Amino acid sequence: MRKSSNNPADLNDIQQFLYHEARLLDEQRWEEWNDLYLEDAEYWVPAAADQPDPHNHVSLIYETGLLRAVRVKRYRHPNAFSLQPKPRSVHLVSNVILDSFDKNTSEYCVNSRFVMLQYRREQQDVFAGAYRHRLRVVKEGFKIAAKRVDLLNCDAPLENILIYL
Amino acid sequence: MQHYTDAQLADLIRRDAVHKKVYTDPDIFELELARIWNRAWIYVGHDSQVKQPGDYFATSIGKQPVVMTRHRDGKVHVLFNRCSHKGAQVVGDTCGNLPQLRCSYHGYVFDTDGALIHVPNAEGYDGVDFGKGKPGSDMRRVARVDSYHGLVFASLDAAGPDLKTWLGGAAASIDNLVERSPQGRIEIAGGCFRYLHDSNWKMFVENLNDAMHPMVVHQSSSGTAKRVFDERLQEGDPLPFELEMLAPFTNNYDFFEKMGLTAWDYGHSVTGGKFSIHSAYSPIPGYMEALVEKYGEQKAREILAVNRHNTVVYPSFTLKGAITSIRVVKPVAVDKTVIESWVFRQVGAPEELFRRSVTYCNLINSHANLVGPDDYEAYHRLQHGLQTQDGNEWVSQHRYLGQDELDADGARHAVGTSDMVFRHQFDAWKDYMVTAA
């Protein structure tokens, strides 16, 4: 997609935004990360490949503002035992493609691939998959209106996923 | 492999404690597979997973691959998933429909009841003890299959009590699960989580009726949810499902004490009864009306008044009636266990009830949520703490010892936080493990 009056951002702006989101997670700046999201934005990790919706099937994570606020606050809780010792992460975002721009909602659909390495207590886990972001153009740049994370092995027997993908 | 005599096995279980080897010794784990998992009634699946002839669902009993099939006469079979020829798994996917089961190695074909029906180049078997119609040439069926309200269980042991007798008082939890449908019918729907734990299977099974842990283990999720919702919800806002679900985990000790604990033969047990952490949920519009239409007002009230919390059908199956979900225990190794969570739809109930069940499972049973990982952490620390050689070989189960009550029907009762349930599970464990030799 080329930059034009109908399409005010360019790929570089969007990539920088996705990298910024990944960086906030890796630096454990949870509150700032949550501020990237619109209050009613869905953060969704389906539990099945090609899962059509979050209502008729279980999901690894399905959160809007209230539950995200709980999770973000819990990250700082002194007795969140599964976070002691603290998990660490590296999120790599790649293969970024602008799928579409909707003028009416001022939203981009962005497709990308990710790898997330989670490390905690001598164990490193690798998660990989696809991101689908809906990014709304706002005064200060973008806000996330929705994020869907399709984990490659979403239906495998897995141990804990402790950090947002 | 270290061989345990009956006396040595019996010595691992005392009234007030069990030896830590029951959780840590790989040889004990192998014996458990042989003597518990190969003998008890083990949950296989629900018959709604194999509705049509040819439908199959591949799963496991202990570590053995099996496949549940629907034959063309309507009967449900559970077959060992092994070709009678060279031993390859015949069914390779988890579920689907196959009119015949064809081995992918040499193309031997079996009917959905396990009978060998086609061998390529069959004249090679003339005059020998293998081939179509010859004994031992079929895919083997497990020794016994039975179902209760569509929940299919199998036992690899031809002897032993029938399923209904074996379930005892735990059967009432299944009755209630199904009665909660305005059509008296449940169906598997909404998929499954498979949560891998690095701990012994018994730690999960015990935890389901452990009422001393929620207020400690889940304070960071339940307690935080209460605070965040308090801050953000305005007066008069409808209470979200999510808060109703998370908040009761940090109820006080008195609540869990009074919730009560009941146990029956073969290691089964239940927490709650009159009330539980699930009993204060808001009514779902249209649900009570649908139940009243089917059962009448009084019976509908009685059905919803049953507030069993977690029912454990030892060793493989646990259920929550109010949530319409089950968890299935899959032992993998002495320190490795997969817990599957499945959600049912109450046929004829408002869709909102199903969505509440889905939401509950997302919040509590997913391996990416805020609740399950803290349970996982507790089991992990048990598994590792028990590696110490500090002179303390025993795991305590002293709480409220000697205060159980036995009723006329043979059920044992205790306060909710009693260790009775653990003593009771290990009584059953000992019966399986020691009497088998």
Image (tube, rainbow, N blue to C red):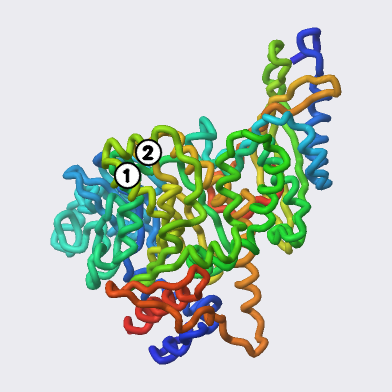
According to the picture, the residue beneath numbered tag 1 turns out to be: B300
Q: In which quadrant of the rendered view does residue B172 lie?
A: bottom left
Q: Quadrant of the C terminus of chain A?
A: top right
Q: Residue at x 51, y 52 (%)?
A: B194
Kindly give the residue lying farthest to the bottom in the view shown.
B7
> Is A101 located above or below residue B72 in the figure?
above
Query: Observer-nearest residue: B104 or B410?
Result: B410
Label 1 CA crowd tier, 10 Å (few <14, some 14–19, many 20+)? many
Look at the image and tell me whether residue A120 can be seen.
yes
Label 2 CA crowd tier, 10 Å (few <14, some 14–19, many 20+)? some
* First in residue order: circle 1 vs circle 2: 2
Residue at mark 1 to residue at mark 2: CA–CA distance:
7 Å
Question: x%, y% of residue A100?
Answer: 68, 17
Mark 1 and 2 residues: CB-CB less than 8 Å, in contact? yes
Chain letter for the residue marked with disc 1 in the picture: B
Where residue A22 is drawn, which disc sits there? none
Q: In which quadrant of the rendered view does residue A107 lie?
A: top right
Question: x%, y% of residue A44?
Answer: 62, 36
Query: Observer-nearest residue: B186 or A89?
Result: B186
Kindly give the residue lying farthest to the top in the view shown.
A5
State left or right for residue B288 relative to residue A21. Answer: left
Question: x%, y% of residue B85?
Answer: 29, 59
Kindly give the residue lying farthest to the right in the view shown.
A140
State left or right for residue B117 relative to residue B226. Answer: left
According to the picture, the residue beneath numbered tag 2 turns out to be: B288
Q: Residue at x 53, y 82 (%)?
A: B398
